Every structure is written in structure tokens, then in C-alpha cells.
Amino acid sequence: MVDELIFFSKRDCPLCDHGFPAAQRLAAHHGLCLRKVDIETNASWLEEYGERIPVLCFRDRVLGWGRLSERALERELAKVLP
């Protein structure tokens, strides 16, 4: 089973539009799956992430949120990858 990055976003979100390509490159570089989910489809996601999107998670750990930086995401992912 391949590990998965989860990209929490919502419609009409410029930061999400900017951050998704960074998440795609990170996933490709590390051979991970990337799943994009709309927080507006789940009340608990909307409550948890509503003010912080986009949010990129790996193994239930938040790697970054808001204006996503590829370097910062790489540093955070390195902390949890073997």
C-alpha cells in the first residue's frame, strides 16, 4: 500500500490553487499518492480546517497550511519518512 498525502481545500480558494501543484510535485518526488478533498463535503473537516486551508497532511500529521512552501513541506515530510 502506497502512503498518501491529503490536500484539504475548497472551491474558489486562490491559496489552494497555488498550493496544489507544490503538493503534486512533493507526492511525485517521494512516490506518494495525493488525494485532494473538499472540506465543504464534511462538517468535521470544515470545522477543523475552515480557516487554515489549504492543509497538506501525511499520516495524520499536518505538513503545512495556508501559503505552502515546497521547502518547508520537504522539511516536514523528512521528519516522518524513514
Image (cartoon, rainbow, N blue to C red):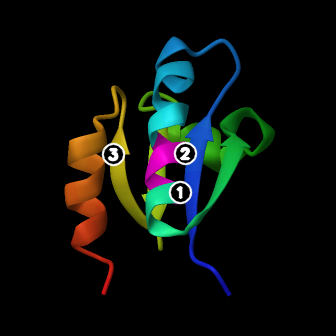
Q: Quadrant of residue 42?
A: top right
Residue 30: x and y in percent read 45, 66
* Residue 77 image-quadrant placement: bottom left
Relative to 37, 22 lies left or right: left
Q: Amino acid at mark 2?
A: Gln
Q: Quadrant of the C terminus?
A: bottom left
Q: Please state the horizontal and vertical placement of residue 52, each as a whole percent of the image.
A: 41, 32
Q: Is residue 14 above or below residue 54?
A: above
Which SS type dominates the magenta stretch?
helix
Label 1 close to label 2 by CB (< 8 Å): yes
Mark carried by residue 43 = none
The span picked out in magenta is: 23-27
According to the picture, the residue beneath numbered tag 3 turns out to be 64
Which residue is disc 2 drawn over? 24
Element on which disc 1 rests: helix
Q: Residue at x 54, y 69 (%)?
A: 31
Residue in the image at 57% along x and 76% along y = 3
Could you say which disc has been placed on residue 28 in the image?
Answer: 1
Q: Are marks 3 and 1 in contact (CB under 8 Å)?
A: no
Q: Quadrant of the N terminus?
A: bottom right
